[in-house]
Image (spheres, grey):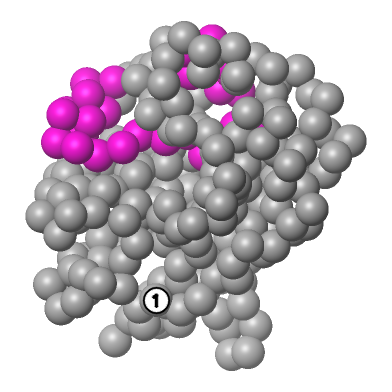
Amino acid sequence: MSALHDEFFSAFDQGNWFLASQKIVSLADQSDYGAEILIRLFEGDRFLSNGKFFPGICRDERYPRITQQIVDLLCEQLDRDPSVFEKHVFLNVTPTDFSNPLTVEKLAGLGQKFHQSDRDLVLELSEIFTPDELFACLETVEVFREAGIIIGLDDYGTGVIRATDIAAFPFDLVKSDRSLCGFEDAWDSPLHAELMQVSETKTLILVAEGIEDIDHTSGLLALGYQYVQGYAFDQPSKLIQRN
């Protein structure tokens, strides 16, 4: 285990974290569509960036218990006051989450609780899934979808999942990464066209993420995206503090 991984879990185990929320809005009229739940770890006055400081953290065998604690907090908040949540609540999941039966059970229960409060849970499958791992969890994903859980792919364009995989897998939603959407010189990438071609044959909710320039709205609409997430539209705000 690397020192950086140890720092992550040390901060987590000490309770130095909270859940934040960042809205996802319509590109057409900027109405609220939903919000992503984000975990924020800190050490003193320093925030610990999951991606920057802890590469590979989502494949750590201890990671499913992080997801389990997040799910427990969300369930507790739903029991207290579901009105703090948007209509669609996005939560990132990893291969280690899907390989853990208790985590899968808790995620299914969370989906039920959101459904009971007239909200939808969106599970974003991280782009660290390989095609083999993706299709290995097909049966679980189909059960989730039958229960009303929306299945999404996160960070399209950064990993090994391609448009052909999206076409073959029962995704309801795809988020394209900031590297594809946040810079105008990336809009010529063939990955956009490949994704839009899939969307012509199956219904997909398409989200451009990591957008920091509100003037990009018309360009993203022209590419075919319907929704957007990023600092230009909403700053992450604290949602639930761990007791």
Q: Can residue 102 be seen in this snapshot? A: no
Which image quarter: residue 140? top left
61 vs 116, left or right, is: right
Say how many tags the image has. 1
Residue 51 position (above or below residue 209): below
Residue 163 forms part of the magenta stretch: yes
Q: Nearer the viewer, residue 119 or 142?
A: 119
Which residue is identified by label 1?
239
Task: Give the x, y percent position of residue 243.
Answer: 29, 86
Residue drawn where x is 47% and y is 44% of the image: 59
Residue drawn where x is 65% and y is 83% of the image: 46
Residue drawn where x is 35% and y is 34% of the image: 151
Residue 243 position (above or below residue 1): below
Task: Give the x, y percent position of residue 14.
Answer: 40, 82
Q: Residue furthest bottom?
A: 44
Disc 1 crowd rating (10 Å Cα; few below 14, some 14-19, many 20+) is: some
Q: Residue furthest right?
A: 185
Magenta stretch?
138-167
Which image quarter: residue 157? top right
Q: Nearer the viewer, residue 221 or 143?
A: 221
Q: Can residue 48 be seen in this snapshot? A: yes
- Kind of residue sitting beneath label 1: Leu
Task: Give the x, y percent position of residue 240.
Answer: 35, 78
46 vs 92, left or right, is: right
Task: Give the x, y percent position of residue 111.
Answer: 19, 48
Which structural element holds mark 1? strand
Residue drawn where x is 73% and y is 42% of the image: 218
